[in-house]
Amino acid sequence: MPRQKLKGFTSFESVESALRKFLKAVTIEPDVETLDIVDAVGRVASHQVKALRDYPPFDRAAMDGFAVRSEDVISASEREPVELRVVGKVEAGSREYVRIGEGEAVMIFTGGRIPEGADAVVPFEYSTLLGDHVLVFKPVPKYGNVSRAGEDLHAGDVILERGTVIRPWHITALAESGVTKVKVFKPLRIAIVNTGDELRDYRQARGKDEVVNSSGPLIEGYAKEIGCVTTWSRIVRDDVNEVRAAIEKGLRDADIVITTGGSSIGEKDLVPEAVEGIPGSELVFHGVNLRPGRTAGAYVVNGKPILMLSGLPVACFIGLEVFLKPLVRKLYGVKEVPEPTVRARLTRKVANVVGFRSYYRVVLYSMGNVIYAEPLRLTGSGIISTLIRGNGILEIDENVEGYEEGSEVIVKVIAPIYKGKPHFINW
Amino acid sequence: MPRQKLKGFTSFESVESALRKFLKAVTIEPDVETLDIVDAVGRVASHQVKALRDYPPFDRAAMDGFAVRSEDVISASEREPVELRVVGKVEAGSREYVRIGEGEAVMIFTGGRIPEGADAVVPFEYSTLLGDHVLVFKPVPKYGNVSRAGEDLHAGDVILERGTVIRPWHITALAESGVTKVKVFKPLRIAIVNTGDELRDYRQARGKDEVVNSSGPLIEGYAKEIGCVTTWSRIVRDDVNEVRAAIEKGLRDADIVITTGGSSIGEKDLVPEAVEGIPGSELVFHGVNLRPGRTAGAYVVNGKPILMLSGLPVACFIGLEVFLKPLVRKLYGVKEVPEPTVRARLTRKVANVVGFRSYYRVVLYSMGNVIYAEPLRLTGSGIISTLIRGNGILEIDENVEGYEEGSEVIVKVIAPIYKGKPHFINW
């Protein structure tokens, strides 16, 4: 029986295929800036960075104790300690030159430079100081308790690869190896075009009947979390020319344009129409086997992306997870760190729509040693309370029909796991 | 046999006991500021926040289709469709008042307000538009494909609890429920006192023999990652009066003072001596069963903490993980989100020192379906390359003697997992 399609989708492309085409079609490159290493924490290295000097710069004590010639204490034991003459003291910061000969030792503290002649450190625990002599109760091997020059980092060792997210310990290694500034990517700039005659900015909306633009602020917050900045976010009326003008301004002002609304199967779906009118625009994909979020699509104009997402917040969020995050990671060259997951037991059966990749929000809670996952409703992509109360996301692949009650599933954790069953579960 | 102790530790307190005392002794409260909701992403809510209005504010379509009286289409089927008269159209943003009577329908788009008289939406998929009439091929239950007013959030529902880390989806819920500003904690201010005659600032150090202050920058970066700010970080000579003056200034300028160096068993361990001279100072703990990091300690002055950490970067880092992070979480009231972990197979045996909690850095790499964990050396707390090349941390409890080669262990992931065995593993 023939049905009218009303600009509907005839088929839904797989997420994999759509994402692959999207990542390939976008050819922009983020800008680069140079920062002091301490200011670079949380940013992404745009170039490989190598150590400029050895670390440690010289042989030094790895423990507090006495620097000795290891051959002098080879026979030392609890019963027959070796007695050495203490000829000096080396603090961590000492710069004076000290040397020892046979039968001699130097009191030394962690980080202190090993005196010439010495090749090992006897810890205080295995020694007793008696005036200007020390008794050693245990032998120590050559280089025992010594950090050798360059053993940690050699000049030329790679500290940061392009795409490394800079963490606190990188700063330590950079500082130790003589690097004071690093090149990092400037945050990618995102322009947000929220379409819809009905939308009101949250700062102005007051009336009970007003529809708040909540996807715009969602994208702003999401952009910040993944290391981007929002150049601007504006609400545009459902008028092809106004939408096109806003998108063109976005292409000038920013690296990435994201639209919300106006790309669904409704009559007012004017974002594609607006973009088709921009010279050089190329459709990448439109309509994917994603629930929620099947109306997502993308164009590029000279390699610059226009990502079209739903105006319904949960569908918009899933679109950001599935398309924006991988794009930003690719542009910065960031490798994936596994996100926190837990193994949980499903409290109810969940079904998948054949051929779709579904994202269920779940409530994770622990009772005894078991973590349970209570699935929340999937339909109604405007259902934001599932994101507030839910603390996990269960992804179901297109080739999986669903999971039975009691199944063990792997759930991505987005907020703390409840201790005990929360009161709102028995809705 | 009696041994000279040289200000050594006679015993090491358990990490649990030391941390419990530390969290109890610190009684400061972070300041609060009010931010626009979009600017609050990544910050911590200082107060509970409730919805100010229902969401959705009215019954609305959850799909594109035709708003109908469900009783009119109860008999609809593929063979015998029900024909209804289409009397209007409702876009998502429509504000005009529309009503339907028996045998009537209204074309409606997702988010559109359900007309008076209608109680369900027949999706386009189950209908065919013929001029000003529509054929409906399937019945729909009462409220089918309708989002009821307030079904998502009721005015008064809790959106943020005190201590919630504000994520993008919270912004959506806040915007939808009429909240435009939120109270969040101001970042805790940290003053860093790096002790050591030998230390040079990384911006100035140039000579091969110079010892760079690398723990200060480590703490600055770490503070930023956990939502704090560094008020200042300075290098202080090994002089009790100078150290005391710096700590007292830190207590005036900041919420938390962290010192590095000068609290070990060496002769120059002057931080405790300096702090003892500050009126009202109380020792909380000093010396813990932690490897690396056993020299950690803390004082409070009027409930304000002075955390004493090693100047050796890895020991300092573990001290931040074990003492600073839990303190900051407690002060902000943040609940713990599980950190990303993987189950991995040990490539070598690892041994633990009885009674100590050890932190091994490991290299995680995948081959086939198995993830392997190659332990890196634990000793030499200055070994920062283990943090650069290592991408996981294996914690071994004090009551565990170690793990055999081939054991399955749970490892915390701090950087991307290598695909295949990295070249530097065969050191």
Image (cartoon, coloured by chain):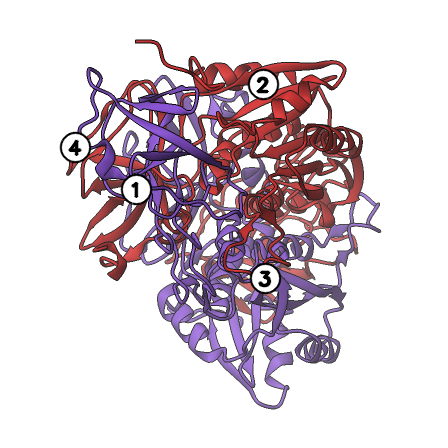
Chain colours: A red, B purple
Front position in the image: B189 or B343: B189
The reply to whether discs 1 and 3 touch (Cβ–Cβ < 8 Å) is no
Q: CA distance from mark 1 to mark 2?
A: 30 Å
Are labels 3 and 4 assigned to the same chain? no
The reply to whether discs 3 and 4 touch (Cβ–Cβ < 8 Å) is no
Are labels 3 and 2 assigned to the same chain? no
- For the residue labelled by badge 4, is the local secondary structure a helix, a strand or a loop? loop
Tell me which residue sits at (21%, 55%) in the image: A426
Q: The N terminus of chain B lies in which quarter of the figure?
A: bottom left
Mark 4, residue position: A404
Amino acid type of the residue that numbered disc 1 sits on in the rendered structure:
Arg
Q: Position of residue B3 (x, y in %)?
A: 44, 69
Q: CA distance from mark 3 to mark 2?
A: 35 Å
Are labels 1 and 4 assigned to the same chain? yes
Neighbourhood count class around disc 4 (C-alpha, 10 Å): few under 14, some 14–19, many 20 upward: some
Mark 1, residue position: A377
Neighbourhood count class around disc 2 (C-alpha, 10 Å): few under 14, some 14–19, many 20 upward: many
Mark 2, residue position: A22
Front position in the image: A159 or A202: A202
Front position in the image: A153 or B156: B156
Mark 3, residue position: B180
The reply to whether discs 1 and 2 touch (Cβ–Cβ < 8 Å) is no
Amino acid type of the residue that numbered disc 4 sits on in the rendered structure:
Glu
Neighbourhood count class around disc 3 (C-alpha, 10 Å): few under 14, some 14–19, many 20 upward: some
Judged from this view, the residue extending furthest toward the bottom is: B279
- Identify the subunit bearing mark 3: B
Q: CA distance from mark 1 to mark 3?
A: 27 Å
From the viewer's perspective, tell me whether residue B263 is left or right of residue B9: right
